[in-house]
Amino acid sequence: MGSDEQVYVSRMLAECGDVSHEECERLMAQLCRKKWKHAVGSMKAELAAAGTDQGRVQEILKKYLTLRQDMATRCAMPGAEDDHGRGEKEHG
């Protein structure tokens, strides 16, 4: 987790007072999902802008794979392997 996220989570915990470990884990997972969705959305825009530039497309895909591995490791997000960037399965 980056320093910005740590500050955000620390501030949330200070404001919320006594939070269970499970609740803290849930909030951290939610933060990771939000970060994942934002990053994937940015990469989709980059891919659209790259058009037919195969070198740039390969660069973006490499960045995506690196991010996916990093998010899966740091955030323990099984959904990070989801190639659609949705995180968890949506509940209907």
Image (cartoon, rainbow, N blue to C red):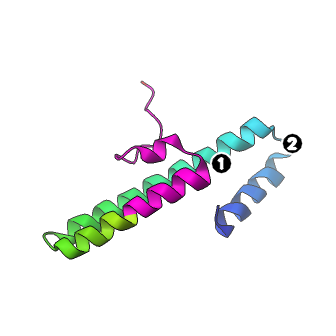
Left or right, residue 35 beside residue 13: left
Please report the residue visible at 80 percent of the width from the left and 46 percent of the height from the top. 16
Look at the picture and state if 60 lies above or below 92.
below
Left or right, residue 43 beside residue 9: left
> Which tag is nearer the camera, tag 1 or tag 2?
1
Q: Compute the Cα span from label 1 to label 2.
A: 16 Å
Left or right, residue 8 beside residue 45: right
The magenta segment: 64-91
Residue hosting label 1: 28
Q: Nearer the viewer, residue 26 or 79?
A: 79
Give coordinates of residue 60: x percent, y percent. Answer: 32, 68
Residue hosting label 2: 18
Look at the picture and state if 56 lies above or below 26.
below
Q: Nearer the viewer, residue 42 or 56?
A: 56
Location of the N terminus by quadrant is bottom right
N-terminal of the pair, mark 1 or mark 2, is 2
> Where, by quadrant of the figure, is residue 64 drawn?
bottom left
Badge count: 2
Please report the residue visible at 39 percent of the width from the left and 48 percent of the height from the top. 85
Q: Which numbered marker is on residue 11?
A: none
Q: Residues within 10 Å of mark 1 (few under 14, many from 20)?
A: some
Please report the residue visible at 24 percent of the width from the left and 68 percent of the height from the top. 57
Q: Amino acid at mark 2?
A: Asp
Give coordinates of residue 23: x percent, y percent. Answer: 73, 38
Q: Amino acid at mark 1?
A: Met
**Mark 1–mark 2 contact, CB under 8 Å?**
no
Residue 39 among magenta residues: no
